[in-house]
Amino acid sequence: MKKAFITGITGQDGAYLSQFLLEKGYEVHGGVRRISQPETVRLEQLGVEKDVHLHEFDLSEGNNIFRIIRDGEYDEFYNLAAQSFVGSSWDQPIYAADVNGVGVARILDTLRTISPHTRFYQASTSEMYGLVQEVPQSETTRFYPRSPYGVAKVYGHYITTNYRESFDMHASCGILFNHESPLRGKEFVTRKITMALAKIAHGSDDPVVLGNLNAKRDWGFAGDYVKGMWAMLQQDQADDYVLATGETTTIRDFVTFAAEALDMKPEWDGEGINEVAVDANTGKRIIEISEKFFRPAEVDLLIGDPSKAQKALGWTASVDVRELASMMAKADYDNLS
Ligand code: NAP
Ligand code: G4F
């Protein structure tokens, strides 16, 4: 039986990866932060919370990481933990650097010292492309991060490739484009939209207040992306791979797809912060804009080229953005029923 450790096991990807590895027969361990109310709700939603082994863990604590790795003898180590909300990284840039950047070095240096056989996965991100230098973005596209989150993730990415090259470690980075699900955190734009629209469909009169509707993202389903993470660690040679759908969509169009899945008929009117959407079926205003949700620097366009992963790993995204918006909106609607 293979043994895996997942940092960030309580997060969206941690829950889907746990479920996937358990189905493959792994013994699954994961790191949880000590907080006043333990948050294993996603593992519970997938019905796997009793099947995983949880350990107190924080990426900012080197000795904690050392003991976990020394005591565990893991075959595979997936580093999914991060301060993952881009918006917060302008408020806590030093924390983002420590956890998302230096935290990766803490793990790698411990693995190098006491467990060099362990295969390592680093959660790199399309946010590293930021002000994009090429369209679509691939493994060879130059990084130009636009947030403290993205800058810290670039360090995490390069320290992983550096340890691979310096110490011959099996350490791979998945450069993952946005991936969502009904388990997505409520502050991210897709889930914020689907939760609020579900409430409106149940009778609420509160519109969703958003920021920049023109940003474009390459959105896929998280359940697909964790399979790609695993596939990377099964290769003879470690390497870096983009996982993406190859399709890009504005926030505005995501709203439309989610609203249509809930039998609304959104009609858009106005421009900039005066733009609104009204459901033509009911006359209710469903979208408003506020400057509060604009970012100090924006990532305008992300669209990934997943051809390397398709060829080498046999990986493809199975859910398109319209299906994804519908899946999330209907799940949120059903949760409220
Ligand atoms: P998520 O739902 O926000 O989960 C983040 C996880 O990290 C949570 O379990 C969180 O624990 C944990 N964490 C945060 N700070 C920590 C710390 N200091 N020490 C230990 N654990 C800590 O994020 P996700 O969507 O699953 O993303 C997983 C990873 O992929 C992240 O590294 C993210 O940056 C990266 N990524 C995500 C996407 C995407 O679109 N989802 C795309 C590219 C890359 P709590 O439950 O205690 O908060
Ligand atoms: O949903 P978001 O907060 O995700 P973002 O910033 O793209 O980051 C996510 O994907 C990255 C991969 O590219 C991950 F690395 C990262 O961990 C995270 O999972 O915002 C998406 C877009 C942005 O352009 C933002 O400005 O939506 C725009 N947006 C417009 N109104 C909003 C809102 N974002 C949020 N969160 N809330 C709004 O009201």
Image (cartoon, rainbow, N blue to C red):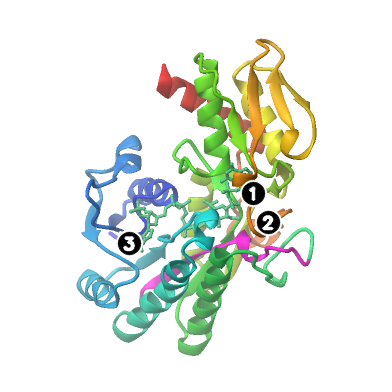
Rounded to the nearest angstrom, the CA distance separating label 2 from label 3 is 36 Å
Percent coordinates x, y for residue 185 in the rendering: 45, 43
Nearest to the observer: residue 149 or residue 140: 149
Q: SS for tag 3?
A: strand
Query: What element does badge 1 sit on?
Result: loop
| The C terminus, quarter of image | top left
Specify the label residue 227 is tagged with. none
The reply to whether dot 2 and dot 1 touch (C-beta < 8 Å) is yes
| Sequence-wise first label, 3 or 1 | 3
Q: Amino acid at mark 2?
A: Glu
Residue occupying the far bottom of the picture: 166
Q: Is mark 1 within 8 Å of ligand 2?
A: yes
x and y percentages locating residue 244 in the rendered image: 64, 52
Residue at 64%, 49% (x, y): give it.
294
Residue type at numbered disc 1 = Phe
Q: Toward which corner of the image does residue 220 lie, by quadrant?
A: top right
Dividing the picture into quadrants, the one containing residue 240 is bottom right
The single residue placed furthest to the top in the displayed view is 282
- How packed mark 1 is, by other alpha carbons closer than 10 Å (few <14, some 14-19, many 20 or more), is some
Spatial separation of the CA atoms under disc 2 and disc 1: 8 Å
Front residue of 230/206: it is 206
| Quarter where residue 68 is shown | bottom left
Q: Quadrant of the N terminus?
A: bottom left
Which residue is disc 3 drawn over? Answer: 4
Task: Give neighbour class at mark 2: few <14, some 14-19, many 20+ (Cα, 10 Å).
Answer: some
Q: Is mark 2 within 8 Å of ligand 2?
A: yes
Q: Nearer the viewer, residue 312 or 296?
A: 296
The residue that appears at 68% across and 56% down in the rendered structure is 298
Percent coordinates x, y for residue 69 in the rendering: 27, 73
Q: Is mark 3 within 8 Å of ligand 1?
A: no
